[in-house]
Image (cartoon, helix red, strand yellow):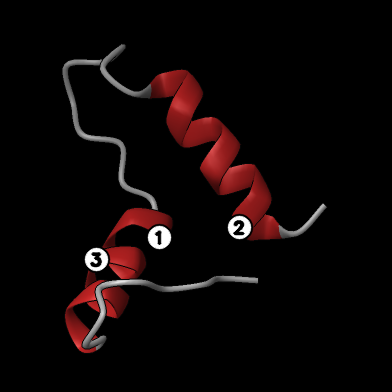
Amino acid sequence: MACNTATAALDIVVEGKYDFPVLGIIKPGAKEALKATKNKKSVSL
């Protein structure tokens, strides 16, 4: 299992369960990728 796979799975499990922010790398990278496209679509492998 790739490290980003584990990060994505963990993000879903812990989202909103703690009083402190849990930072991941998937969402920020996806947001930036979408900003950089003309058609607002992106693919990650």
Front one among 39 and 18: 39
The local secondary structure at tag 3 comes to: helix
For the residues carrying marks 2 and 3, which lies nearer the camera in this image? 3
Residue 23 versus residue 3 in the image, above or below? above
Q: Tell me the residue that label 1 is attached to.
A: 25
Q: Earlier in the sequence, mark 3 or mark 1?
A: 1
Query: How many neighbours does mark 2 have within 10 angstroms: few (below 14), some (14-19), or many (20 or more)?
Result: few
Q: Residue at x 55, y 71 (%)?
A: 44
Q: Which mark is residue 31?
A: 3
For the residues carrying marks 3 and 1, which lies nearer the camera in this image? 3
Q: Quadrant of the C terminus?
A: bottom right
Cα separation between marks 2 and 1? 8 Å
Q: Where in the figure is residue 23, as x and y percent of width and height? A: 31, 46
Q: Are marks 2 and 1 in contact (CB under 8 Å)?
A: yes
Q: Tell me the residue that label 2 is attached to.
A: 4
Q: Are marks 2 and 3 in contact (CB under 8 Å)?
A: no
Front one among 7 and 38: 38
Residue 41 versus residue 9 in the image, above or below? below
